[in-house]
Structure formats: C-alpha cells, structure tokens
C-alpha cells in the first residue's frame, strides 16, 4: 500500500503532470524503503520496476512498455498492473502471497538503492539510449 506522501502523485495528476512524473514518486518511495531496510532488491532495475508496478496499481495512467523493449513476462505483468489500477475494483492482495514476496525481498541486498548503483544505472541507460539514437522524450 502506498504511503501518504506517495499519494502526492494524485496531486501531480490533478496538476496535469505526465504519468512518468507521477510514477516517479512511487519509485522514490521504493528507494527509500530499500534504504530504510524494509526490504532489498537485486538491482536498481528491480527497485524501479517495483515502484512502477505500485504506480500502475494505484491508478497512474502509465501504459505498459512497447513490445520488444522488455521481456514478455515483464510486459504481461505491467499490463495486469495497469488494468488492475484502471478498474475501480480495489481488492486486498492475498496475505500469504504478500508475506512470501516480502520475505524474499528481505533477503536481497540493500546496495541496489545506493548512490553508486543508481549512478551506474543512469549512465548505462543513457549510453543505451544514445546508441539507439533516441534523445529526450521520444522513444
């Protein structure tokens, strides 16, 4: 469940800000959770994916990635999250599944949200973007 400060994403939505800006609040919250030791992540990519998933489920109109950008499994999960968030039905997640997922994440490293890891990730993504020839918001 998103924290109160993450619901600021709704404020961003009312102000007409882009879905990626709204989702950024959820990703930031996820990084904070990892730094606080609530759980870990294998990589910065996983931490970002968790934040985006939460954003989609909270109703942020962030569409799933285009075909070919990510694995089919990731895309399918993003589609499920998106449809779940866009439908008004807000059911409670299964407690057993929720606990097991948290238990697995607790065993992961906290280094994924470190300044160094995020910096390395940003550089590698920028390098990949540059080699694709896409700059700025077009993708």
Image (cartoon, grey):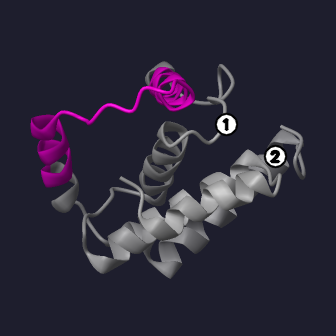
Residue where numbered disc 1 is placed: 61
Residue 101 percent across, percent down from the top left: 20, 44
- Above or below for 93 versus 112: above
Label 1: few (<14), some (14–19) or many (≥20) C-alpha neighbours in 10 Å: some
The C terminus sits in image quarter? top right
The residue at the point 46 percent across, 23 percent down is 80
Q: Does the magenta stretch include residue 101?
A: yes
Along the line of sight, which residue is nearer the eye, 48 or 115?
48
- Above or below for 58 versus 23: above
- Horizontal side of 59 relative to 90 (left or right) equals right
Query: Disc 1 versus disc 2: distance between alpha carbons?
Result: 29 Å
Residue where numbered disc 2 is placed: 131
Q: Which of the 4 quarters of the picture holds residue 15? A: bottom right
Q: Is residue 30 magenta?
A: no
- Above or below for 17 versus 96: below
Indicate which label's residue lies in the foreground, 1 or 2.
Answer: 1
- Horizontal side of 4 relative to 99 (left or right) equals right
Along the line of sight, which residue is nearer the eye, 44 or 17?
17
Q: Give the range drawn in magenta.
A: 74-103
The residue at the point 60 percent across, 73 percent down is 119
Q: Is the magenta stretch mostly helix, strand or loop?
A: helix
Label 2: few (<14), some (14–19) or many (≥20) C-alpha neighbours in 10 Å: few
């Amino acid at each position: 469940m998103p924290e109160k400060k993450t619901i600021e994403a709704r404020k961003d939505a009312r102000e007409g800000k882009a879905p990626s800006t709204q989702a950024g609040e959820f990703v930031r919250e996820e990084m904070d959770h990892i730094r606080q030791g609530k759980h870990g992540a294998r990589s910065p990519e996983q931490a970002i994916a968790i934040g985006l998933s939460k954003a989609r489920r909270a109703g942020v109109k962030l569409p799933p990635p285009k075909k070919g950008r990510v694995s089919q499994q990731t895309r399918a999960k993003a589609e499920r999250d998106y449809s779940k968030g866009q439908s008004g039905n807000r059911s409670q997640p299964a407690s057993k599944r929720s606990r097991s997922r948290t238990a697995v994440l607790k065993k992961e490293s906290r280094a994924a949200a470190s300044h160094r890891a995020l910096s390395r990730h940003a550089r590698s993504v920028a390098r990949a973007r540059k080699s694709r020839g896409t700059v700025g918001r077009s993708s």
